[in-house]
Amino acid sequence: MDGASDGTKMKGQTSHSIIGKHIQRKLRNTMTDAEIRLWQCLRGRQLAGYKFRRQHPFLDYVLDFVCLESRLIVEVDGGQHLDNERDKDRDRRLQEAGFQVLRFWNNQVLRETDAVVEAIWEALQRDIPDGTPSPSRPPP
């Protein structure tokens, strides 16, 4: 898939308003405790060799974490995101661009880190074509 129905490119398409404001750099330097904990599990291809980026710009959004090769986005949310219509619209637009979106609550990441990482690993496995060997499970 080269792009979404609105003509956006799949990988690396960045809104110039996000680049111009250097928002992603600021967000990387002010991550929540939950984002920091999850990043420690995802960085450096620790999760079965998949490369994740943090605070990655795409369309008009800055994504918390994304694995571009598997088109998987992981968002870590606080209470302000409960029943948020903007998040629903954002998820719809990202899905139309070919991404799968996983959302976890901050307290879930902090209290159930292993379960969150397992859910991410399982989502990555759903993207593997038939006949391709699965990477090993992440360590407990």
Image (tube, helix red, strand yellow):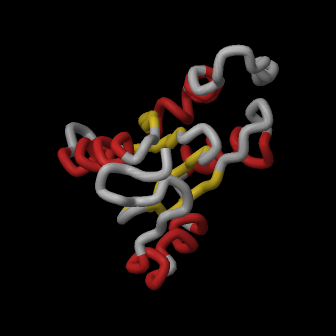
Which residue does the image show at 60% across and 47% down from the upper left?
68
Indicate the quadrant where residue 95 lies.
top left
Residue 66 vs residue 27, the one in the foreground: 66
The answer to whether one can see residue 140 in this image is no
The spot of residue 124 in percent (x, y) is 61, 28
The spot of residue 81 in percent (x, y) is 29, 45
Which residue does the image show at 56% across and 25% down from the upper left?
123
Which residue does the image show at 49% across and 53% down from the upper left?
10
The answer to whether one can see residue 9 in this image is yes
Residue 41 vs residue 10, the one in the foreground: 10
Which residue does the image show at 46% across and 44% down from the upper left?
75
Residue 39 vs residue 94, the one in the foreground: 94
The spot of residue 136 in percent (x, y) is 81, 20
Q: Does 130 sit left or right of 81 as displayed?
A: right
**For the view shown, which residue lies furthest in the bottom direction?**
20
- Indicate the quadrant containing the C terminus: top left, top right, bottom left or bottom right: top right
Q: Is residue 37 above or below residue 30?
A: above
Residue 50 vs residue 38, the one in the foreground: 50
Q: Is residue 7 above or below residue 117?
A: below
Q: Does 19 sit left or right of 43 as displayed?
A: left
